[in-house]
Image (cartoon, helix red, strand yellow):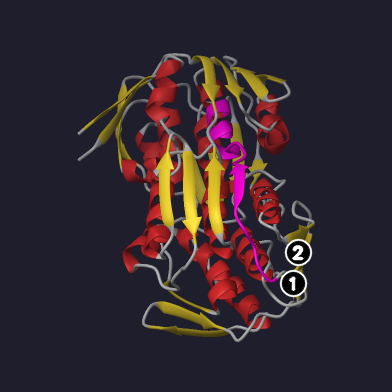
Amino acid sequence: MRKLFVEGGHPLKGVIRVSGAKNAVLKLMAAALLGHGRFVIRNVPEIRDVFTMLGVLQALGVEATLNDSTIFLNVETVRGEAPVALVQEMRASIQVMGPLLARLGWVRLSKPGGCAIGDRPIDLHLKNFKKLGAQIREEHGFITASTNGLVGKELYLDFPSVGATENLMMAATLAQGTTVIHNAAREPEIVDIQNFINLMGARVYGAGTSTITIKGVTQLGGADYAVIPDRIEAGSYLIAAAITRGAITIEHVIPQHLTAIVDKLQETGTEIKVGTDTIAVRGVQDLFPINILTQPYPGFATDLQPQYMALMTLAGGSSVIKETVYTNRFRQVEELRRMGADILLDSNAAVIKGVPQLSSALVHATDLRAGAALVLAGLAASGITEITGLDHIDRGYEKLVHKLQTVGGRIWRED
């Protein structure tokens, strides 16, 4: 069994450079299936999810390699069915459905896997694929979609789903006519996809707003593109500085993508100075308890909720966290309780009463962001915390141990 050991009580000090965005690069890789020719994707985090998506693309017939944070793709003839094991390992694999349906006219995929953080149905994807002219069949755990040609339509999403927005936007690039997606998700990663596929020759407008317009084209080519910085990784390190009462400068960030977490950290008393592409954080001894409500972007990101909860376990007083995006996003609570946290759950709300000190314990990472929360808690706890379930953490944080070690974190792996 692999374990992560974290010795707490050491304020983090120094500089951390943020990697490329996990939630963008996986979708750019899928979007490449729409085009023909060579692709270069730069600033790629070398994480488990990226290697899984590389495997998916290779299984679909794409020449795909990753070298020195750069992906090289050669997309010519592609297939419409990916191996079950790879698709079930990562939820983002569903994003190949839109590109393959648009390019080949058919696709067959196993229902995707990923972190067990609550209901993330793909109904919005399938319902709107049908509106674009696809026939959908679900049987024996597989989804088969086929079409004689997608046709642009006015689409309205019941919820601003990131995945559905991305999948439909990519599929519509090769549809006949114009597609308009209303109540679209507004995340920065969607803007990144728009910029990437427009570089390939698509005509997409409005990403970053609630209305996205896609004017269909007949063919797309290759592209050379650099991925935006990972705002969730950046936010995690901002919280790491606050929870250890340290002083860290986060480099290679887009501060506008982090407004919600910066605002909430400042309300706790944490000192923050925002630069052009840097954010400097200085922790304080006495944290104020501040409530949060997770919401789609530009609201407070659900992917930072577990890490923020870890911080609030040490605030002076009581705070409330309401989770409105996922139904099972409090899986870190029981593990934080093992470390001495005082947390009461009531449906989609958590009431956290701050304690003077967390203590080390043997804990398990149940999903990616819960794992990050346990690492942060371990950095602040007394003694040495042991964390299992590292596969989850490896899915989304590039060189986590090394980056924390460079700023004074006492953290290491052992088999």
In the rendered structure, which amino acid carries the disc numbered 1? Tyr
Sequence-wise, the earlier of marks 2 and 1 is: 1
Q: In the image, what residue occupies the spot 51% across and 41% down?
A: 306
Q: Is residue 34 left or right of residue 336?
A: right
Cα separation between marks 2 and 1: 6 Å
Task: Say which of 290 and 148 sits in front.
Answer: 148
Task: Say which of 219 and 185 sits in front.
Answer: 219
Image location of residue 404, percent across then percent down = 43, 22
Q: In the image, what residue occupies the spot 39% across and 68% down?
A: 82
Mark 2 in CB contact with mark 1 (< 8 angstroms)? yes
Magenta stretch, residue numbers: 218-238
Q: Disc 1 marks which residue?
A: 156
Question: How many other residues sit within 10 Å of disc 1, few (<14), some (14-19) or many (≥20)?
Answer: some
Quadrant in which the N terminus appears = top left
Q: Is residue 176 left or right of residue 403?
A: right
Q: Disc 2 marks which residue?
A: 183
Q: In the image, what residue occupies the spot 66% across and 63% down?
A: 165
> Can residue 350 be seen from the camera position used here?
no
